[in-house]
């Protein structure tokens, strides 16, 4: 005799509630549907599982046995589904480095797809992640598709994710820290620390574009990986640096938004259209919904800045 797991779940829920109305509500079905399904189940097993009248619902001795074993059966079925899900190929995501927008996105994807295994990489830059994307060894990477020193291959798809405002990080006793916001004109009076990973060609290009467009000074160029390294170098050298105004900062540092114009970093999701599995397409849908819900695609109300190549690509308002 074959059992319908749905009917088993109905019986277990009714045993927990001992009330057809409450059990039907818990199952999000009509009370009449629950009653007919319980009757069908009893007909299938050949014995009554419940006694019911206008006042009460109770389990029969056979019902006690059925519900006890039914709970185990449902638990085993869920474990089976979970184990099979864990055999799926993991979603391989490159987040560049810790604490950036791609890390937030990956945390969201983990929450929305708890049964899907993930492999997270830190290539320190989109340029460094491209070979793995093209080889099919990576599913999704993030970054700025411009400033890579080459055009993206036609097999790679891109999706805008975020126009992230970039601020300035500095020692707490730096003169610019006295202001709630820092204009780019004011920043031009203070030499910058330029901190980039060797692999992050697109970030280095973004910084150089900003330096050229706003006549900024460079005090020192340093190669390094990650926000922690930037913060340590700013503390050690005393120069301000481009950085995020969100997230924690170590003691002795502060961050300020930049205005006139607000510098924007254009994050994109990048994937190989030739090797994209269904899980990749689902992840891209979740990323788009998350970005839209957080208004990440919107340009700020203030005057903003993007490198000319990004501005042309995004076709945003000036």
Image (cartoon, grey):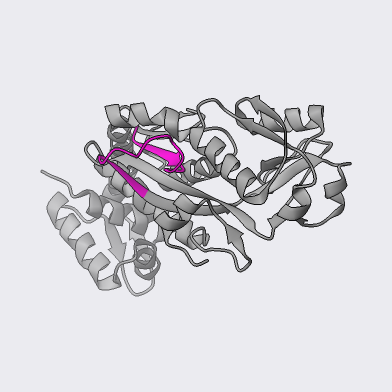
Q: Place residue 25 in its image quadrant.
A: bottom left
Q: Position of residue 3 (x, y in %)?
A: 17, 46
Bounds of the magenta segment = 138-158
Query: Looking at the rendering, which quadrant does residue 208 occupy?
Result: top right
Q: Position of residue 271 (x, y in %)?
A: 33, 40
On the rendered structure, is 80 left or right of 231? Answer: left
Given residues 162 and 98, the one toward you in this image is: 162
Residue at 42%, 41% in the rendered image: 114
Let me know if residue 141 is in the magenta part.
yes
Viewer-side residue, 250 vs 225: 225
Q: Is residue 128 left or right of residue 46?
A: right
Which residue is located at x 30 percent, y 35 percent?
85
Instruction: Decide if residue 65 is in sight here.
Output: no
Pick the quarter of the image with the N terminus.
top left
In the image, 279 versus 115, the foreground residue is 279
Q: From the top left corner, tell me how far across and down residue 4 is, in percent.
A: 18, 50
């Amino acid at each position: 005799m074959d059992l319908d797991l749905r009917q088993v779940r109905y019986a277990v829920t009714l045993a927990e509630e001992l009330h057809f109305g409450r059990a039907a509500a818990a199952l999000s079905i009509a009370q009449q549907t629950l009653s007919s399904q319980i009757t069908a189940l009893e007909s299938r097993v050949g014995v009554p599982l419940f006694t019911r009248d206008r006042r009460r619902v109770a389990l029969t001795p056979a019902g006690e046995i059925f519900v006890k074993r039914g709970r185990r059966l449902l638990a085993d079925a869920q474990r089976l589904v979970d184990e099979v899900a864990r055999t799926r190929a993991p979603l391989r995501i490159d987040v560049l480095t810790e604490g950036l927008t791609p890390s937030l996105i990956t945390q969201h994807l983990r929450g929305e797809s708890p049964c899907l295994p993930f492999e997270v990489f830190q290539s320190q830059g989109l340029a460094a992640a491209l070979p793995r994307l093209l080889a099919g060894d990576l599913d999704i990477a993030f970054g700025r598709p411009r400033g890579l020193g080459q055009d993206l291959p036609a097999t790679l798809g891109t999706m805008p994710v975020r126009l992230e405002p970039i601020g300035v990080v500095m020692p707490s006793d730096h003169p610019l820290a006295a202001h709630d916001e820092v204009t780019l004109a004011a920043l031009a009076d203070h030499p910058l620390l330029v901190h980039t990973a060797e692999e992050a060609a697109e970030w280095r290009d973004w910084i150089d574009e900003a330096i050229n467009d706003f006549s900024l000074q460079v005090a020192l160029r340093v190669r390094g990986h990650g926000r922690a390294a930037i913060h340590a170098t700013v503390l050690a050298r005393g120069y301000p640096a481009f950085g995020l105004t969100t997230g924690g900062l170590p003691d002795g540092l502060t961050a300020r938004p930049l205005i006139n114009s607000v510098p924007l970093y254009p994050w994109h999701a990048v994937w190989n259209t030739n090797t994209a599995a269904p899980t990749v397409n689902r992840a891209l849908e979740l990323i788009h919904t998350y970005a839209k819900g957080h208004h990440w695609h919107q340009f700020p109300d203030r005057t903003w800045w993007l490198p000319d190549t990004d501005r042309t690509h995004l076709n945003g308002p000036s």
